[in-house]
Image: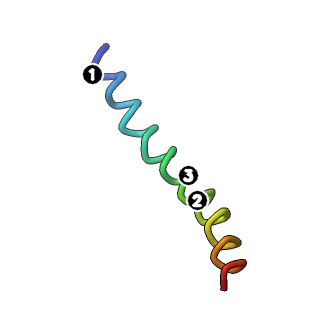
Amino acid sequence: MGGHGFNFWWLFIPIIVIIIIPIFFIFFIPLSAANA
């Protein structure tokens, strides 16, 4: 069962990254545009 849990996390971690990266750009681009 422990191995099954690890498989779940290896699927879940990339999903978190895919969600966080666009959020980071949504905040970063307006800041860089305001500074420009």
Q: Where's residue 8, x and y in %?
A: 40, 30
Question: In front here: 22 or 27?
Answer: 27
Amino acid carrying mark 3 in the image: Ile
Give the quarter of the image for residue 10.
Answer: top left
Q: Where's residue 18, x and y in %?
A: 52, 54
Looking at marks 1 and 2 on the same chain, the residue that comes earlier in the sequence is marked by 1
Question: What's the distance in space between the residues labelled 1 and 3, CA to CA?
Answer: 26 Å
Q: Secondary structure at mark 2?
A: helix
Decide: few, some or many residues near mark 2? Use Cα within 10 Å; few <14, some 14-19, many ≥20. few
Question: What's the distance in space between the residues labelled 2 and 3, CA to CA?
Answer: 6 Å
Question: What's the distance in space between the residues labelled 1 and 2, CA to CA?
Answer: 32 Å
Q: Where's residue 33, x and y in %?
A: 69, 80
Q: Which residue is mark 2?
A: 24
Which colour scheme appears in the figure? rainbow
Q: Which residue is mark 3?
A: 20
Q: Which residue is mark 1?
A: 3
Residue drawn 67% across and 64% down? Answer: 26
